[in-house]
Amino acid sequence: MCEVRIYDNEDQILKDLIETNIIQRGIGNPNPVKLGRCIKELERINGVRSGSANPTGTTVSENISFTQKDLADKLGMEVRTMQNYKKLTELIPEIVDLIDTGIVTPTTALAIAKNMKPRNRNNSL
């Protein structure tokens, strides 16, 4: 048995491919940074706004119909876990390389990044 789907645009195709891939592979995706990028793309496609969120995952300043909680539930993970995957995409390339090679775990990388001081444009670290 096969299912035939007709899509109206490329975003629908991309959304379906990403969701299916994440759900089939589970949260144990071998590339956590890539998973974070996929989550960001799904948020864009679904119209989930970034910003301050209340405990239910909805943005405080806007009334939106599809929330971070909705997306997290669909993907089978907690909102906080999803947010941590997205944070991995904002790390400096050197830390991302350490995650990709398995030298540093995603949790350790986030802890390192949290303790790093921002670089001042006038002087470097």
Image (tube, grey):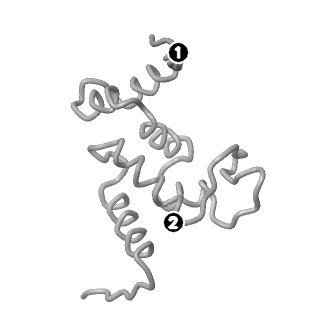
Picture quadrant of residue 125: top left
Q: Nearer the viewer, residue 94 or 85?
A: 94
Which residue is at the far left? 101
Instruction: From the viewer's perspective, tell me whether residue 74 is left or right of residue 50.
Output: left
Upstream in the sequence, badge 1 or badge 2? 2
Question: What amino acid is at disc 1?
Answer: Asn
- The CA span between labels 1 and 2 is 38 Å
- Label ID, residue 45: 2
Picture quadrant of residue 8: bottom left
- The crowd level at tag 1 (other Cα within 10 Å; few <14, some 14-19, many 20+) is few
Label 1, on which residue? Answer: 122
Residue at 53% across, 54% down: 72
Q: Is residue 122 above or below residue 75?
A: above
Residue at 24% across, 30% down: 102
Instruction: From the viewer's perspective, tell me whether residue 1 is left or right of residue 20.
Output: left
Residue at 34% across, 31% down: 93
Question: What amino acid is at disc 2?
Answer: Ile
